[in-house]
Image (cartoon, rainbow, N blue to C red):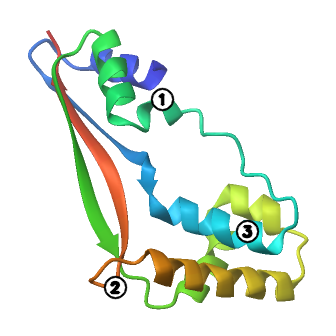
Amino acid sequence: QAAVDAAAEAVRPGGRVGIGTWDLEQFTLQRAVRGALAAVFEGFTPPPPPVWAPLGDADGLRAAMEAAGLTDVEVRPVTRSWRLADPEGFFRSFRDWSPPIQVMLEHVDASVIDAAAAVFAGVVDEMSDASGGLPNTALLATSTVP
């Protein structure tokens, strides 16, 4: 909520505020990663929702913007399919740019990472749409500062 409040305060009256976030229910990449980790780590427990989770559904995002005093709030989902040419390689790359995955895999044997990457590729294949891409949905919200 603090980020939404700050955005509303930073814009002049009559100005527009836009916010984009992942729709947590339709973020298939996250579900694919969790599926792969659960398959190779016995007792795997997904991490708690991110601090921004209330903004991860249309109603929560709309409510946060209205609570910040913004008006004319419109939230629309935008779904795009991501084609992963090399799902296993993509999974392995998480260690380079995803802090939560870096910590989780820091001391894990390469064979376990390879197994998780293979499971990830299978999950991506199962979740892919007719175009062969992994559909992921973002929420794009616009509003006006009164």
Q: Amino acid at mark 2?
A: Gly
Q: Which residue is mark 1?
A: 54
Quadrant of the rendered image containing residue 136: bottom left
- Mark with earlier residue (3, 1): 3
**Viewer-side residue, 130 vs 88:** 130
Q: Which residue is mark 3?
A: 37
Quadrant of the rendered image containing residue 75: top left
- Mark with earlier residue (2, 1): 1
Q: Residue at x 14, y 9 (%)?
A: 146
Q: Which residue is mark 2?
A: 132
Quadrant of the rendered image containing residue 33: bottom right
Q: Please state the horizontal and vertical placement of residue 99, each as a whole percent of the image.
A: 69, 57
Q: In the drawing, does residue 104 fall left or right of residue 13?
A: right
Q: In the drawing, does residue 90 fall left or right of residue 34?
A: left
Q: What numbered label is drawn on residue 128? A: none
Q: Amino acid at mark 1?
A: Pro
Q: In the drawing, does residue 36 fall left or right of residue 62?
A: right
Q: Residue at x 57, y 85 (%)?
A: 121
Q: In the drawing, does residue 5 fall left or right of residue 30?
A: left
**Viewer-side residue, 95 vs 125:** 125
Q: Secondary structure at mark 1?
A: helix
CB within 8 Å, label 3 to label 1? no
Q: Secondary structure at mark 2?
A: loop
**Can residue 77 be seen in the rendering of this structure?**
yes
Q: Residues under labels 2 and 3: Cα distance?
A: 22 Å
**Can residue 68 be seen in the rendering of this structure?**
no
**Viewer-side residue, 38 vs 105:** 38
Q: Residue at x 43, y 90 (%)?
A: 85
Quadrant location of the N terminus in the rendered image: top left
Q: Please state the horizontal and vertical placement of residue 25, each as a whole percent of the image.
A: 45, 48
